[in-house]
Image (tube, rainbow, N blue to C red):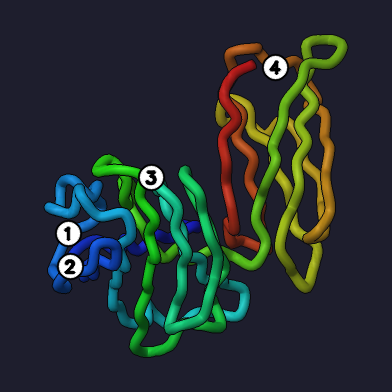
Amino acid sequence: MYPYRIRLRGPWEAEPLDPPGEVRRVDMPARLGECGLGDCRRVLLRRRFGRPRRIDQHERLWLIGERLAGCGEFRVNGEWVGACSGGSFAFPVTPLIGDRNQLTVDLIAGGPDDGLAGDVALEIRCSAYLSDLRVEPVDGGRARISGEVCGEAECSLDVYVLAEGKVAAYRKCAAGQRFEVTSDESVSDSAQIRVELISGAVLWCAAEIPGR
């Protein structure tokens, strides 16, 4: 089931740049103070990894992170892929991944609590995925669900909306377009709504929207 996540946990290398110091092995995720680097204001973090597996035509690779504390610039095999100033991040990296790879994070820290505080991972996604999902009530107790199919796909995709496990609405949508559907029947305000993006018989993406 997509997305499929491969966590890049330890061992990492940490090279203190400000003040300069010796390269050391560290285990991530962690904050700098937990690695004995609490006095550093700039650290270069490295993680080597292999190709996860053969990537099918409809799949893409992303570098994702759950929680960066501080400011970081990310490179894969020397190529800049993005920057982040706190919080989560996600960068497409499909064409950069080879049999042998190196991820580097140039981290600017404001103190010992900064660092890679959450998991960093490679994530295998399909070429199209759901984004910006919203739900709002309409007349008769029904629900209107909207969102966007981001990415790319050669054919139109099926969008299913499920309320409490039952199909409440359906439509086709092309990649790169927004969609809006209204449930056929009333939906409880506390109902868990799930949106699925399907190509043929393969579930490309699924996301849940909490009760209103």
Gap between marks 1 and 4 measured at Cα: 46 Å
In this view, the residue in front, 44 or 56, is 44
- Which residue is at a point 29% across and 62% down the rendered structure image? 18
In contact (CB < 8 Å): disc 1 and disc 2: yes
Gap between marks 2 and 3 measured at Cα: 19 Å
Circle 4 residue: 187
Q: Earlier in the sequence, mark 3 or mark 1?
A: 1
Give the label on residue 11, or none: 2
Is 40 on the left-hand or right-hand side of 102? left
Residue 182 found in image quarter:
top right
Helix, strand or loop under label 1 = loop
Residue 48 found in image quarter:
bottom left
Give the label on residue 27, or none: 1
Give the label on residue 69, or none: 3
Picture coordinates of residue 111, whole percent (x, y): 29, 43
Q: Earlier in the sequence, mark 3 or mark 4?
A: 3
